[in-house]
Amino acid sequence: MSREKKVFKESDVQFYIGSLLRWGVILAMSVVFIGGIIYVYRHGQEKPAYHTFNGEPGFLKTISGILQGVAAIKGRAIIQLGILLLIATPIARILLSIVSFVLEKDYLYVVITLIVFGIILFSMLSGIGG
Amino acid sequence: MTILLLTLYILLGAYFAGLLGSLTGLGGGVVIIPFLTLVLDVDIHYAIGASLVSVIATSSGSAAAYVKEGITNMRLGMFLEIATTVGAVLGAYLASYISAPTIAVIFGLILLFSAIMSFVKKNSQADPTSSKPATFFKLANTYPGQDGKMVAYSVRNIFGGFGLMSFAGMISGLLGIGSGSLKVVAMDNIMRIPFKVSTTTSNFMIGVTAAASAVVYLQRGYIDPGLSMPVMLGVVLGAVTGSKILVKANSKSLKVIFAIVISVVAIQMIYKGLTGKI
């Protein structure tokens, strides 16, 4: 009886994780598409400069910069917001996995999942990207 | 060329990259990066940033379906994600210290390796005998087999697989690809997992691995919205089309054609890297 209950719970979580991934990608792609329309409409006739690497301007590299750009309805900032949502999708999946392992009382995997989350947090906040 | 025209070119190229990547199982990144650098003369750092974004999108999209079917071994995926994310962060960190020509050469070599690997017979044997570490990490599982019956399997040589996974993660972070071919070697050949489980679990891990390096790339200014937008939209649409026609296509002859194309592209990348023309 208890075994059946556990199987049910696990497939339940699989369903939520599947939905989270799908809707995360759909949302991110929609935002990127809207930003893309605005960007191409405004800058479509300009010349691109991708041959040499210059790095992106500051407002496209940080979350606060991107949000300010979105508020000013800049196409490139809206695309970047969509990309942020996309990057956030697998990270949200990790958080959901932590919840599911806690519910299953599998503390070994709660720790393992927290380690993975910690590594991503480290790469975000340690400044190795800056 | 104007931005409008370039965007349309990239959208079309990315669509075919996603389509081919999905039909052959190699992923869109291995096609889109050479397309951007060799054909459109884009700096390889920008190309890698854009490819990384598309990798997250396609792997998350297809993982959604597999997870619901219950083929993915989520514990195994979580366990190995420690290895792949550490590698990915390291690879992304190294990327800015390695020159574009060197990256092109490494890319070419990995590409050649992927082309060869697409012919190696995959492990379809499920072995339920468990080892001590596999039992400790609860990695043994079942998956729905051909006749709908659940097939039991376990995992061998966990630490060997873990080591190769860190390398796969590093290559993914360095080159902006899913490095699925390396992951399959680790899971099929070293850990002896049936390929149905290894391909879906590897795909499940790619999203998190790519996200770990993408946050570094974003802060470094390697992710350009103008490039990433058509790459991401095109690759995803191509991959969706690919998954729809996968059943109808003759995958054997497709594999041969694709392996030849990939090898030519790989040699081109290596040549341009060695002569510093990239």
Image: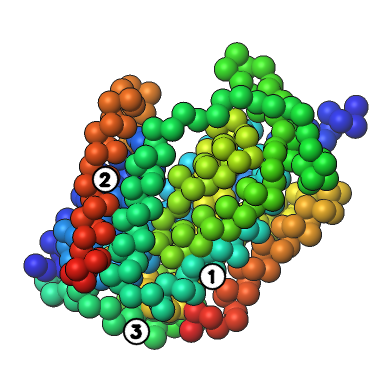
> How many angstroms separate mark 1 from mark 3 (CA)?
24 Å
Residue at 39%, 83% in the rendered image: A59
**Chain identity of mark 3:** A
Residue at 71%, 64% in the rendered image: A115
Q: Nearer the viewer, mark 1 or mark 3?
A: 1
Say which quadrant the C terminus of chain B sits in.
Answer: bottom left
Q: Nearer the viewer, mark 1 or mark 2?
A: 2
Residue A33 in the image: x percent, y percent?
33, 58
Crowd tier of the residue under label 2, counting other residues whose Cα lies within 10 Å: few below 14, some 14–19, many 20 or above: some
Compared with A4, B41 (above or below) is: below
Residues at discs 1 and 2 both on one chain: yes
The residue where tag 2 is placed is B263
Between residue A49 and residue B91, name the one nearer to us.
Answer: B91
Question: Can residue B145 be seen in the rendering of this structure?
Answer: yes
The residue where tag 1 is placed is B90
Residue with the most extreme right position? A1
Question: Can residue B138 be seen in the rendering of this structure?
Answer: no
Q: Secondary structure at mark 3?
A: loop
Amino acid bearing label 3: Pro
**Chain identity of mark 1:** B
Q: Secondary structure at mark 2?
A: helix
Left or right, A84 with respect to A37, comes to right
Residue B39 in the image: x percent, y percent?
16, 58
Do the residues bearing badges 1 and 3 touch, measured as CB atoms within 8 Å?
no
Residue at 57%, 52% in the rendered image: B164
Residues at discs 1 and 3 both on one chain: no
Query: Which quadrant of the structure image shows residue A107?
Result: bottom right
> How many angstroms separate mark 1 from mark 2 (CA)?
27 Å
Residues at discs 2 and 3 both on one chain: no
- Mark sitting on residue A57: 3
